[in-house]
Image (cartoon, helix red, strand yellow):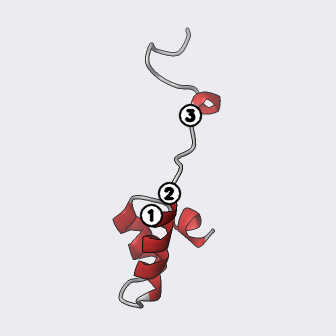
Amino acid sequence: MGEAEGQKTRKEKTRRQFDNEFKKDAVRLFESGNSSLRQVAKDLGISKATLSN
């Protein structure tokens, strides 16, 4: 019973990469003080841990 075709195993998943503009915008959003770290991460579609790194 193998993996269904088209599904990736955990090892095959690739990490998302974010360009510098995305990173700067994310920091700017958080530092503006209008939203929590959790809310900014949610709005951007990333985890809170990713944003806090």
Residue 53, given in percent of the width and then of the height, sits at 63, 68
Residue type at mark 2: give it: Asp
Residue type at mark 1: give it: Phe
Residue at left offset 57%, top offset 43%? 15
Answer yes or no: do the residues labelled 1 and 3 have beta carbons within 8 Å?
A: no
Answer yes or no: do the residues labelled 2 and 1 have beta carbons within 8 Å?
A: yes
Q: CA distance from mark 2 to mark 1?
A: 5 Å
Which numbered dot is residue 9? Answer: none
Residue at left offset 39%, top offset 74%? 39
Residue at left offset 58%, top offset 65%? 49
Residue at left offset 44%, top offset 64%? 22
Local SS, label 1: helix
Q: Residue 2 falls in which quadrant of the image?
A: top right
Mark 3: few/some/many CA within 10 Å (<14, 14-19, 20+): few
Give the mark nearer the N terminus: 1 vs 3. Answer: 3
Q: Residue 33 falls in which quadrant of the image?
A: bottom left
Residue to which mark 1 is pinned = 22
Which of 32/39 is in front?
Answer: 32
Mark 2: few/some/many CA within 10 Å (<14, 14-19, 20+): few
Residue to which mark 2 is pinned = 19
Residue type at mark 3: give it: Lys
Q: CA distance from mark 3 to mark 2?
A: 19 Å
Tell me how many marks there are: 3
Give the mark nearer the N terminus: 3 vs 2. Answer: 3
Which numbered dot is residue 13? Answer: 3
